[in-house]
Amino acid sequence: MRILLTGSAGFVGSHLTERFLQGGHEVIGVDNYISGQRDNTALFLGQPGFSFVEADVSQGIPDPGGRLDWVLHFASPASPPHYQQFPIETLMVGAQGTQNALELARAHGAKFFLASTSEVYGDPHVHPQPESYWGHVNPNGLRSCYDEAKRYAEAITMAYHRHHGVDTRIIRIFNTYGPRMRPDDGRVITNFMHQALRGDALTVYGDGSQTRSFQYVTDLVEGIVRLMDVEDHEPVNLGNPVEFTMLELVGVLQDVLGRPLTTLREPIPHDDPRQRKPDITRARTLLGWEPVVPLSDGLRRTIAAATAHDGTVAATPARA
Ligand code: NAD
Ligand code: UDP
């Protein structure tokens, strides 16, 4: 397959690129590095089948010419500190960026794949969250630049499917982690891991009773690859259904590192969802998929990669 992937220099984009190149496919990566890493492009430059274009996909996606089988739209800041630092750019990449990617797919008769998010459920009143739940989202709060952009992205994807017949897929990704996350991305696994490795206290926001469900990146990639093979246009949750409070996450990290960790309480951010856990019945049925990497194993692998990289541990970014 010949695949154009927006957001190729990001965390998830780099793992997708790796998987597709290993499968003998061609990947044209597009990224403007607003939240990505040049190192993630450097990993693949020179490998057969990989090429890269530096561009802001909200402004337009350079047409690579030739045949395109897939356009995968993964470009968007994803961590709360990143998207709150770049709220307009985040809205634009979810809106104009998605339309540009859809137009490119349409022009080439290519299939289109959208990376949406569990944030479309907002601070959910239904738990766990099935795809049929419409969500509970603050339309103008601090997270709205991301949540509403993704909700619009889903809407325009379905409009291109229904109105123009584009063959589309939509996934809703739940908190995913693994090697090659930006050390300063501010997400909880990155913060806790680097704080622990530095010997600093772990910054627990609020009382630490809020929950998340953490998916290791290879499980996500497997779900994506399987959905590419199935013609189904409705959204599919991809996430690990095992739920942890943030204090339980501290406990798991403590066990993995084999030493006690200290914590520091910080205020809970605005509109921080109280709970989040995917209902993955649809992915199980449709794709025969479920996550196989438990949190402790995934943390071990992520820590090994972070410390193998250069031995140094990044500072935790200041909060917005
Ligand atoms: P990331 O920030 O590491 O990667 C996103 C990439 O998109 C970055 O390389 C960034 O530079 C690029 N990008 C952003 N705006 C762009 C633009 N206008 N033009 C070109 N490139 C642009 O984030 P990630 O965790 O790899 O997330 C990838 C996708 O998956 C995002 O769409 C995100 O919303 C979605 N997602 C991720 C998670 C997660 O837990 N990692 C959860 C839900 C959804
Ligand atoms: N969180 C925390 N300490 C941190 C970073 C995040 O306690 O240093 C909490 C945050 O309040 C949220 C959860 O961890 O409840 C997940 O946050 P993250 O930014 O990783 O993702 P999201 O909120 O988008 O799910």
Image: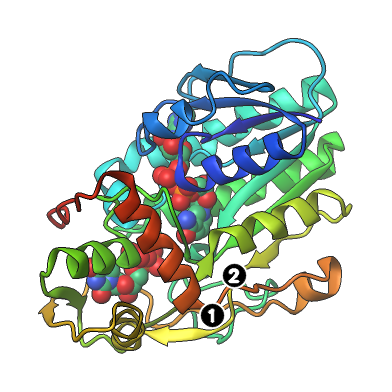
In the rendered image, which quarter is residue 271 located in? bottom left
The residue located at (57%, 48%) in the rendering is 152
Asked if the residue under mark 2 is in contact with the one under mark 1, i.e. CB atoms within 8 Å, the reply is yes
The residue located at (47%, 28%) in the rendering is 41
Tell me the number on the disc at residue 192.
none
The residue located at (42%, 52%) in the rendering is 146
Residue 68 position (above or below residue 255): above
Residue 151 relative to residue 165: left or right: left
For label 2, the crowd category at 10 Å Cα-Cα, with few meaning under 14, some 14 to 19 and many 20 or more, is many
Residue 123 position (above or below residue 185): below
Residue 6: give x, y in percent of width and height.
57, 32
Residue 274: give x, y in percent of width and height.
37, 82
The answer to whether residue 129 of the structure is visible from this angle is: yes
Residue 108: give x, y in percent of width and height.
81, 21
The answer to whether residue 149 of the structure is visible from this angle is: no
Q: Nearer the viewer, mark 1 or mark 2?
A: 2
Instruction: Give the residue pinned by disc 2.
Output: 239
Instruction: Give the residue pinned by disc 1.
Output: 277
Residue 224 relative to residue 272: left or right: right
Q: Type of residue at label 2?
A: Gly
Mark 1 sits near ligand 2, with its Cβ under 8 Å away = no
Give the alpha-carbon distance from disc 1 to disc 2, as whole Å.
8 Å
The residue located at (39%, 54%) in the rendering is 305
Quadrant containing ligand 2: bottom left
Q: Secondary structure at mark 2?
A: loop
- Name the one closer to the observer, 257 or 169: 257
Residue 160 relative to residue 202: left or right: right
- Name the one closer to the observer, 212 or 125: 212
